[in-house]
Image (cartoon, rainbow, N blue to C red):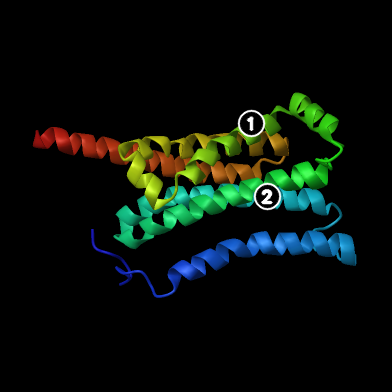
Amino acid sequence: MQALGGIARQPRGFGALLVVAAAVPALWYAWAIYSDFALGSRYLGSDPIKAAEHAYGAWTLRALLATLAITPLRRLTGWNWLAKHRRTLGLYAFAYGVLHLLVWAIIDVQLVIDDLVGWDVVKTDLLKRPFITIGMLALVLMLPLAITSTKGMIRRLGKSWSKLHRLVYVVAVLGLVHFFMAVKLDWREPLVYAIVLAALLGWRVVESRRRAAADGAVA
């Protein structure tokens, strides 16, 4: 398939722009939290902690979906240079997931490591709100993906690397389940993400069957 829009090659500066653009939401919400608490602003509304917690979680899902969108975009447009940015998006997904966890653990339930203040709240949350456990499981599964994202690990793992990184599908589904359970009533936003994920996974199923049929015809 020929490349669309005349950009068969990566535009100059695209990689740096992607890194900066992906970091902007993280920096903005970090500043907004500080400003709302220290300077008395109202960037994040009446509940800045929950707003930031939600935002970091939402950006985790967005980065995951962007990562999964790379392959379909490559196939449909011929922009093969997009493949090199899948790792960047995946690492940002993990980073946003960590920020989501930190806002909950350190600011929301006020977990303090030195005197263990907050551990009882964490235990209560984990027992009474299983969606938190599901979210933590998703983040734990993202850890080996982040660790093995380097070129050296890709070479060492060989074909096993691709098998390991199929965990991203499980992570995305768990993330959506976590989101649906967290919002409880207003499912409009997680539903949008669910539709996008279903489309991305559906494309992969169709593409896999098409390739299998083509291989069968050749054989």
Whether 49 is drawn above or below 23: the answer is above
Judged left or right of residue 187, residue 197 is: left
Q: Residue furthest top?
A: 127
Q: Which residue is mark 1?
A: 134
Judged left or right of residue 201, residue 103 is: right
Could you tell me which secondary element the residue under label 1 belongs to?
Answer: helix
Q: Residue at x 84, y 29 (%)?
A: 120
Where in the figure is residue 18, as x and y percent of width and height? 50, 65
Where in the figure is residue 160, as x and y percent of width and height? 35, 35
Please identify the quarter of the rendering in which residue 135 is found.
top right
Judged left or right of residue 1, residue 51 is: right
Q: Residue at x 60, y 39 (%)?
A: 139
Q: Is residue 172 visible?
A: no
Q: Residue at x 86, y 66 (%)?
A: 41
- Front residue of 36/207: it is 36
Please identify the quarter of the rendering in which residue 30 is found.
bottom right
Q: Earlier in the sequence, mark 2 or mark 1?
A: 2
Q: Which residue is mark 2?
A: 99
